[in-house]
Image (cartoon, grey):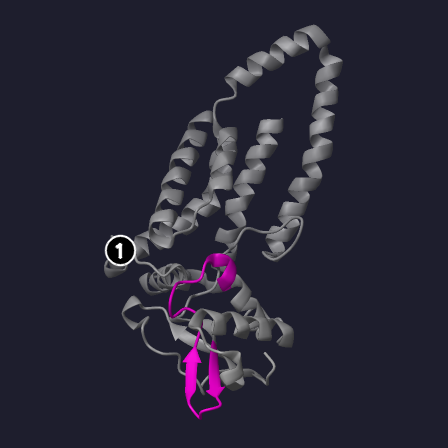
């Protein structure tokens, strides 16, 4: 019973992202263009390009997209059906995560650690049988009841959050769904520094080194990409960080125009300066910064 419910929980982690891909984007998600744009977005966020440019093979990208959705929807059924199908789920899962790490730079180490529940439970069954022989059937009944008391609310909560697609919830959330059809750009913050000498400098803060994933998430949030309203204090803190990285003297800054812009993710366009004046103005920061 504990292993069965653990396998169900593991399977639901995959099932709802696959379901929401079809619900939100339909078959449009399973195209080479969409998968390529998702890859390019991740490459830009990490500031690096894989050694194998699979984005130049649209047929493979299409087949990969179809395979991703099929894998996510089928995993829970493979995980609970039989010992043979569990081995299939384990093999497909390892291959899936190897490819997401290679081509998307996404690691699911904590999720892979849960794959132990897919292994043969023969050893555990022998230990359990020995335990029940000593303790009697009443202990087994208590064990089943205790398992259901703990696991049933967890399964119910995962199903509710999965149906809702709540990826930004706590303590139970749906795994990231990547459900939208990705365009050729992602949002970023462009800061235009007006200096006291009359010059203007446009920076994103990525000029010298790539951001890490936490920093990208922070930029998405304070830029309003997640739907949050602009936060003056957060924008000022970000402007100070960008100034420090660019070695700009705060005393030489007259004001800072903060704008949410769309930056191209195609690797060949990474060096293009942000197109200011076409995005969403968020704030004009006056000294002291």
Q: Which quarter of the rendered picture does the N terminus lie within?
A: top right
Total numbered labels placed on residues in the image: 1
Q: Inspect this view and state whether residue 19 appears.
A: yes
* Residue 153, quarter of the rendered image: top right
Q: Is residue 211 magenta?
A: yes
The local crowd at label 1, few if under 14, some if 14 to 19, many if 20 or more residues have their Cα within 10 Å, is: some
At x 38%, y 35%, the residue is: 91
Q: In this figure, which residue is indicated by the disc labeled 1?
A: 54
Q: Which quarter of the rendered picture does the C terminus lie within?
A: bottom right
Q: Is residue 237 magenta?
A: no
Q: Is residue 94 above or below residue 187?
A: above
Magenta region: 190-216
Left or right: 173, with 11 as reference point: right
Left or right: 3, with 113 as reference point: right
At x 38%, y 70%, the residue is: 207
Task: Name the spot of residue 252 as percent of width and height, x first.
Answer: 49, 84
């Amino acid at each position: 019973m504990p292993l069965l419910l653990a396998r169900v929980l593991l399977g639901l982690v995959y099932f709802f992202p696959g379901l929401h891909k079809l619900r939100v984007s339909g078959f449009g998600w399973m195209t080479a263009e969409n998968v390529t744009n998702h890859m390019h977005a991740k490459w830009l966020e990490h500031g690096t390009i894989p050694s194998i440019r699979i984005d130049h093979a649209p047929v493979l990208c299409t087949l990969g997209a179809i395979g991703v959705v099929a894998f996510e929807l089928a995993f829970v059924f493979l995980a609970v059906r039989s010992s043979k199908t569990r081995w299939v789920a384990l093999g497909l899962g390892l291959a899936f995560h190897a490819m997401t790490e290679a081509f998307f730079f996404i690691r699911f180490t904590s999720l892979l650690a849960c794959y132990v529940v897919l292994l043969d439970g023969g050893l555990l069954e022998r230990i359990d049988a020995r335990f029940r022989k000593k303790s009697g059937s009443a202990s087994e009944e208590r064990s089943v009841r205790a398992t259901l008391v703990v696991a049933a609310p967890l399964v119910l909560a995962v199903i509710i959050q999965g149906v809702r697609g709540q990826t930004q919830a706590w303590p139970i959330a749906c795994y990231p769904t990547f459900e939208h059809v990705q365009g050729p750009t992602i949002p970023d913050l462009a800061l235009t520094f007006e200096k006291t000498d009359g010059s203007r400098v446009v920076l994103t803060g990525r000029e010298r080194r790539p951001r890490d994933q936490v920093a990208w998430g922070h930029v998405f949030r304070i830029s309003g990409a997640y739907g949050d309203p602009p936060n003056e204090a957060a924008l000022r803190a970000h402007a100070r960080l960008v100034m420090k990285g660019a070695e700009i003297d705060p005393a030489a800054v007259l004001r800072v125009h903060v704008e949410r812009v769309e930056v191209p993710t195609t690797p060949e366009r990474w060096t293009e300066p942000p197109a200011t004046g076409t995005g969403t103005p968020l704030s004009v920061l006056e000294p002291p910064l």
